[in-house]
Amino acid sequence: MTAAETHPTIAVGDDAAFMEYALDQARKSPPEPENSVLSTGYSLELPRDQPGDPGTTHAEQCCFIKIANKYNPGDGPSETRIGGILPPNTALYTTMEPCNERLSGNRTCVERILQLKDKIKVVYVGIKEPGTFINKNEMQKRLEDAGVMIKFVGNKERIAQVAMAGH
């Protein structure tokens, strides 16, 4: 049985004392968790041909695999299980828009994000995918149609320079 809650006796009209008591109660509240980076990834960071996923690894795929490895190390590298790990309203930041088509046969980054749309509600994108890679990327339409918000932010010139290095 829980003990009865006790409160101090405060004189009627002593608003400062009531506010001080309210402040004492507020101090008991645990701090909100801070935003933190769960994982990072860059294209070709992980070996090609991940189990069940032929071809090269894109940044988003590497990021998701690393989360799976960190939180489910005994279950293998599949990022398909990370929906239970990600906190609600996880944001994804990516310098180039996630791919919506893969010539390698890999699942697209859009498919990977859609699989996690209950957790990933917004994707921050630096630049659109250059036509050098894929002619037309339907990423934005597919994600927004599924309820995932897309926001373009960043230094487009610098991002494009890095993205196009070696192409």
Image (cartoon, rainbow, N blue to C red):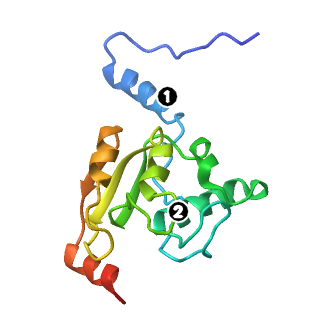
Q: Residue at x 44, y 42 (%)?
A: 117
Point out residue 137 in the picture as x, y percentages from the top left corner: 29, 59
On-image quarter of the N terminus: top right
Q: Residue at x 46, y 50 (%)?
A: 111
Depicted 124 relative to depicted 20: above or below: below
Q: Residue furthest bottom?
A: 166
Foreground disc of the pair 1, 2 = 2
Point out residue 55 in the picture as x, y percentages from the top left corner: 55, 71
On-image quarter of the C terminus: bottom left
Q: Residue at x 55, y 66 (%)?
A: 62
Q: Is residue 77 left or right of residue 151?
A: right
Q: Which of the 4 image quadrants contains residue 13?
A: top left
Residue behind mark 1: 25
Would you say the residues marked 1 and 2 are in contact, meaning their CB atoms lie under 8 Å apart? no
Q: Which of the 4 image quadrants contains residue 23?
A: top left
Q: Nearer the viewer, residue 28 or 113?
A: 113
Q: Amino acid at mark 1?
A: Gln
Point out residue 101 in the picture as x, y percentages from the top left corner: 39, 60
Q: Measure the C-alpha gap from mark 1 to mark 2.
A: 53 Å
Residue behind mark 2: 106
Mark 1 / mark 2, whichever is N-terminal: 1
Q: Nearer the viewer, residue 111 or 25?
A: 111
Badge 1 element: helix
Badge 2 element: loop
Q: Residue furthest right?
A: 74
Q: Which mark is residue 130?
A: none
Depicted 129 relative to depicted 113: above or below: below
Mark 1 crowdedness (10 Å alpha carbons): few <14, some 14-19, many ≥20: few
Mark 2 crowdedness (10 Å alpha carbons): few <14, some 14-19, many ≥20: some
Q: Amino acid at mark 2?
A: Asn
